[in-house]
Image (cartoon, rainbow, N blue to C red):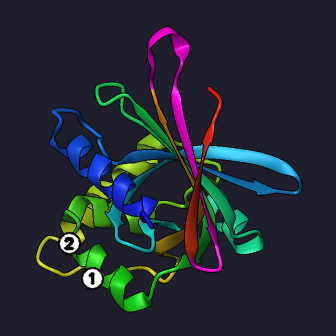
Amino acid sequence: MINPINIVKEIFEKAQKLNRNYPNVAVLATASNNKPNAGCVLIKEINEESLVFYTNYESNKGKEIEKKPFVALVFFWEELKPQIRIKGIAEKVSKEKSAEYFKSRPKGNQIATIISKQSKELKNYEKLIEEFEKMLEFYKDKEVEKPENWGGYIIKPFEIEIWEEGKHRLHKRVLYIKERNIWKSIFLYP
């Protein structure tokens, strides 16, 4: 049986070869108190079992995942034509893996991570920039440690739909559903 995550990975790798700014961007949907929420995340890894992204655990999405780990992801690359919709369960990656990825990031991004109170109210943007500049100077010759409230999430899919544009709006839609660790596929009307 086909593992649809491998199809996603293949399309993802093609997207990364395109000349665009964020080929790894996906819309992540979460929910809390029966209200939906969505925003873009950068997918940093796809393997045979899961997809990985990194964020502030105290952000809105982090709090929502903590309460309800069921999430949805949507990829769309106009140049390649497919839309990929994924439903899965999110869980934190290991602290070691998060620390390893954090160290690979540019120092400016590391500093932005430690000063950001993601999703909280910001009273003065200029003060944020001032704080960033001070921290950039402070850490000029020092290593920046990963904050405890930041790290990765693994999304383990249980449904993947791959939509391909068709002539006359006769789009090809294949839905893969994981049941007892086996992927089954069905076609859907456009």
Identity of the amino acid at label 2? Ser
175 to 52, vertically: above or below: above
Q: Are marks 1 and 2 in contact (CB under 8 Å)?
A: yes
Tag 2 residue: 104
Q: Is residue 52 left or right of residue 58?
A: left
Q: Is residue 120 left or right of residue 135?
A: right
Q: Position of residue 164 (x, y in %)?
A: 44, 31
Decide whether residue 171 is among the magenta residues: yes
Q: Is residue 137 left or right of residue 2?
A: left
Decide whether residue 55 is among the magenta residues: no
Residue in the picture at 58% in, 62% down: 184
Tag 1 residue: 100
Does residue 137 appear anywhere in the picture?
A: yes
Q: Position of residue 177 (x, y in %)?
A: 62, 61
Q: Position of residue 32 (x, y in %)?
A: 81, 58
Quadrant of the snapshot with the C terminus: top right
